[in-house]
Image (spheres, helix red, strand yellow):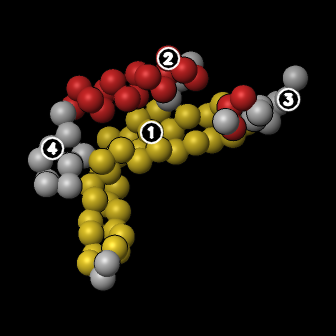
Amino acid sequence: MSSKWRRFEVLLPLQFNDRRDVPAEWLAEAVLEIVDHFGAASYETQKVEGHWRHGGVLYRDNLVRVIVDVPDSAKNRE
């Protein structure tokens, strides 16, 4: 059995593109779905600000980070 681990980080948006807030229960459901699949997850409540360009327009996102550490296996890399 491998003792190596792989970390995945997922950024979840706090607002939709029209700036309405994503319901907190949706974020909680996303985290719990990850926990159900992988057994554990960490959720950072500190806001992450993302910046990206598309079609010459600068966009900003407010995000939170979900972190999951899993054994480095072919199944977990799918």
Q: Earlier in the sequence, mark 2 or mark 4?
A: 4
Q: Amino acid at mark 3?
A: Ser
Q: Residue at x 14, y 54 (%)?
A: 19
Q: Which residue is mark 4?
A: 21
Q: Which mark is residue 36?
A: 2
What separation in Å lies between label 2 and label 3 (alpha carbons)? Answer: 22 Å
Q: Amino acid at mark 2?
A: Asp
* 33 relative position to 29: left or right: right
Residue 46 visible at all: no
- Locate the N terminus by quadrant: top right
Mark 2: secondary structure: helix
Q: Give yes or no for contact between labels 2 and 3 (Cβ–Cβ under 8 Å).
A: no
- The correct choice, above or below, for 54 with respect to 16 in the image is below
Q: Earlier in the sequence, mark 3 or mark 4?
A: 3
Q: Which residue is mark 3?
A: 2
Q: Which residue is mark 1?
A: 66
Residue 56 visible at all: yes
* 12 relative position to 9: left or right: left
What separation in Å lies between label 1 and label 4 (alpha carbons)? Answer: 18 Å
Query: Which numbered mark, 3 or 4, is in the foreground of this view?
Result: 4
- Locate the C terminus by quadrant: top right
Q: Residue furthest right?
A: 1
Q: Residue at x 32, y 61 (%)?
A: 49
- Within 10 Å of the Cα at label 1, are there few (<14), some (14-19), or many (20+) other Cα atoms? some
- Within 10 Å of the Cα at label 2, are there few (<14), some (14-19), or many (20+) other Cα atoms? few
Nearest the viewer among 33 and 2 is: 33
Q: Amino acid at mark 1?
A: Val
Nearest the viewer among 45 and 27 is: 27
